[in-house]
Amino acid sequence: MSQFAQLTADRRQEMAFCRRASFAHVAHAVEIVHLRRVVLGFFSQVKQGIVHLLERIADPRLQALVDDVANAIQKLANLLAGRRRPLSEVDDFA
């Protein structure tokens, strides 16, 4: 085989390897992107589970606090309403 033919064959083989390597790089990049999505999806589900757990723990306590505040406001309103005099009893000129 002549030297030119050998160089041409070597160059073709090198180009074939480069194409295969390029495809391998693209496949690897796609795999990495997919794995990142899987991992991010997993962490998103873990985060959502923690949020739901905290909501289940905190909601009854917050509701009790809101109810206590509402009761206190209602008691204060009742107290203030009891001290109020009807307009018919108010005598500004006396």
Image (cartoon, helix red, strand yellow):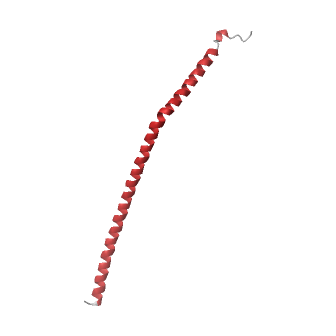
Quadrant for the C terminus in the image: top right
Of all residues shown, which one is farthest toward the right?
94
- The residue lying toward the viewer, choosing from 50 and 25, is 50
Foreground of the two, 47 or 94? 47
Position of residue 11 in the picture relative to residue 86 (left or right): left
Q: Residue furthest left?
A: 1
| Quadrant in the picture for residue 18 | bottom left
Q: Is residue 75 above or below residue 14?
A: above
| Residue 78 x, y percent position in the rendering | 59, 18
Q: Nearer the viewer, residue 77 or 11?
A: 77
Name which residue lies at 47% across and 34% down.
Answer: 59
Residue 22: image x %, image y %? 34, 70
Image quarter where the N terminus lies is: bottom left
Above or below residue 77? Residue 38 is below
Horizontal relation, residue 68 to residue 20: left or right: right
Q: How many marks?
A: 0
Residue 34, placed above or below residue 90: below
Residue 65 or residue 23, whichever sits in front: 65
Residue at 53% across, 30% down: 65
Residue at 44 percent of width and 40 percent of height = 53
* Residue at 28% from the left image edge and 86% from the top image edge: 6
Q: Is residue 35 left or right of residue 79?
A: left
Q: What x and y, as percent, mark residue 5?
A: 27, 87
